[in-house]
Amino acid sequence: MIKKSLFPAAGYGTRFLPATKAIPKEMLPVVDKPLIQYGVEEAIEAGINTMAIVTGRGKRAIEDHFDISYELEHQIKGTSKEHLLEDIRKLMNSCTFTYTRQKEMKGLGHAVLSGEVLIGNEPFAVVLADDLCEGDGKGVLKQMVELYKKYRCSIVAVMEVEKDSIHKYGVIDAKELEKDVFVVSNMVEKPKAKEAPSNLAIIGRYILTPDIFDILRDTKPGAGGEIQLTDALKTQAQKGMVLAYKFKGKRFDCGSVDGYVKAINYFYDKTKK
Ligand code: G1P
């Protein structure tokens, strides 16, 4: 039912300079896998088979990562290292990758709209790869796809965050519909702490119905002068229905050095268990 996932991956990753001068931030490794691969694995687990990646200049390493490297395969064939490529080979065989380029950086809303050509007129998931999620039992996207089957409307993943970091997020105002599921009445992108309508912040997992594209086309630049997905979702919530879902699991903010180091430590410790 949800068959495609959009990965906005055109940003510059300035917080990680100089590491991201020549490699995309989505390719930064967490232990032995690049960030974006975790997102793709989460999407596959949710039953999604098309990864629609919105890239930009200097992002070719992402395409190469999800392609066969004949030279490398030839070199390691029959050696003790061959198994190291097994997982990524399996992953490549279980889904299709499509790409388009976002030519100008005009915000997340603009990135999603740039992906319309890859999505078409069907509901789809959005994964922000620098939010690295580990679901509790089931992946976060899988939890959201199940919820979508019940309600058939756009859904944003949310979590409670401390007041002193609420200004970094899209924040919702909402009423609880069932346990951990809320009907959104308002959303604000990057509010000041005292103006935040709640402590429920949007994290980088969305299910969107395709009418979002028309709304995005009419959405004016908002916070930071960028076209914000949050603003388009607010319009969608006020015209129809948008749900927020307090997911079960963990999320690491790998868009910041602190969160990235926490993720590495967490996933490294897991390999030792
Ligand atoms: C984006 C969204 C924001 C959301 C955040 C989650 O912001 O615009 O609503 O809360 O991702 O990571 P960014 O972190 O790209 O500034």
Image (tube, rainbow, N blue to C red):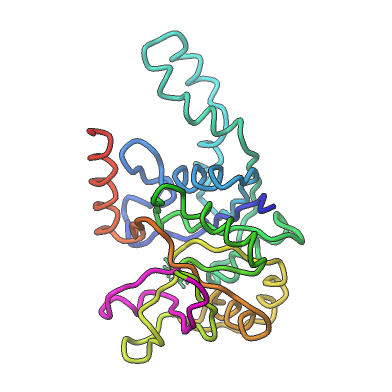
Q: Is residue 171 magenta?
A: yes
State left or right for residue 224 relative to residue 269: right
Residue 208 image offset from top left, x and y in percent: 63, 65
Residue at the spot 66% in from the left edge and 75% down from the top edge: 216
Observer-nearest residue: 175 or 207? 175
| Residue lying at the far front of the rendered structure | 178
Q: From the viewer's perspective, is residue 15 above or below residue 96?
A: below
Q: Which residues are magenta?
A: 158-178
Residue 214 image offset from top left, x and y in percent: 73, 75
Observer-nearest residue: 44 or 78? 44
| Residue lying at the far bottom of the rendered structure | 195
Q: From the viewer's perspective, is residue 188 above or below residue 14?
A: below
Residue 156 image offset from top left, x and y in percent: 52, 68
Residue at the spot 60% in from the left edge and 55% down from the top edge: 6
Residue at the spot 67% in from the left edge and 72% down from the top edge: 212
Residue at the spot 67% in from the left edge and 81% down from the top edge: 240
Residue 97 image offset from top left, x and y in percent: 63, 42
State left or right for residue 182 relative to residue 199: right
Q: Is residue 194 magenta?
A: no
| Residue lying at the far right of the rendered structure | 121
Q: From the viewer's perspective, is residue 171 above or below residue 80?
A: below
